[in-house]
Image (tube, rainbow, N blue to C red):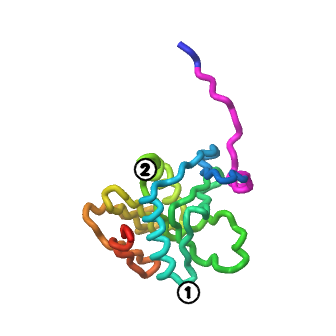
Amino acid sequence: MATQITPDYPQLTADRFLEMDFGEDKAELDNGVVRMMAGGSARHARISGNIFLALGSRLRGSGCSPYNADMATRTHDLSVRFPDVAVFCGKNDPAFDAAKAFTDPRILFEVLSGSTARTDLTVKLEEYKALPSVDTIVFVDIAAERLRVLQRTGPRAWSDVAHDAPVDLPLPALSLTLPHAEIFARD
């Protein structure tokens, strides 16, 4: 039986990762290891765009803004994630214009695909829940057009509801609701 040799590389830090230029490629930092990311499907991009646009128009002037997957969320010293849509508050000052990552999202959306669902629903979920600023995490199932919504109910307590039928998405931390039809719109 062959022995597998595992190289001993130092873990990459979030600070170092954020200094790297991947060119046209996209990557996340997963517990000190760079993980390359493939592009999503047209449906994935459309739904992410729908959420981003719906939030943008509703949040204008509120002090909170949606960011697409170009803006990183630093979940800890060894992980940097790129949620499909994230809402950050208090970042509208020009002093934040050059930032590549924030550490304090209020709302996070992950649009699930077959290749990312396992990581999104396990590793990323736990990292997101550990961020004290996070109020709501939404997993969007594009195949079934359903939502799984986790909302903070206490410092370490969460409600976790997987909706089996179409439902409008209340976001009490932002005092708004996103209609199901708008999230999954095809036009």
Q: Name the residue: 37% across, 58% down.
A: 142
User: Disc 1 and disc 2: Cα gap in Å?
Assistant: 34 Å
Closer-to-camera residue (33/127): 33
- Other residues around mark 1 within 10 Å, as few (<14) / some (14–19) / many (≥20): few
Q: Earlier in the sequence, mark 1 or mark 2?
A: 1
Locate the C terminus and report the quarter of the image it occupies: bottom left
> Image quadrant of residue 92?
bottom right
Report the residue marked by disc 2.
117
Verify whether residue 16 appears in magenta: yes
Residue 64 drawn at (x, y percent): 55, 78
The location of residue 172, given as percent across then percent down, is 41, 77
Q: Main secondary structure of the magenta part?
A: loop
Question: Percent from the top left, x then y, of residue 114?
Answer: 41, 48
| Residue drawn 42% across the image and 64% down it | 138
Q: Is residue 63 magenta?
A: no
Which residue appears at 35% of the width and 63% of the height? 147
Q: What element does badge 1 sit on?
A: loop
Q: Secondary structure at mark 2?
A: helix
Task: Look at label 1 and name its amino acid.
Answer: Gly
Q: Residue placed farthest to the top in the image?
A: 1
Nearer-the-camera pick, 83 or 12:
83
- Give me the disc on residue 61: 1
| 62 on left or right of 156 | right
- For the record, the magenta segment spans 4-20
Residues 40 and 31: in front is 40
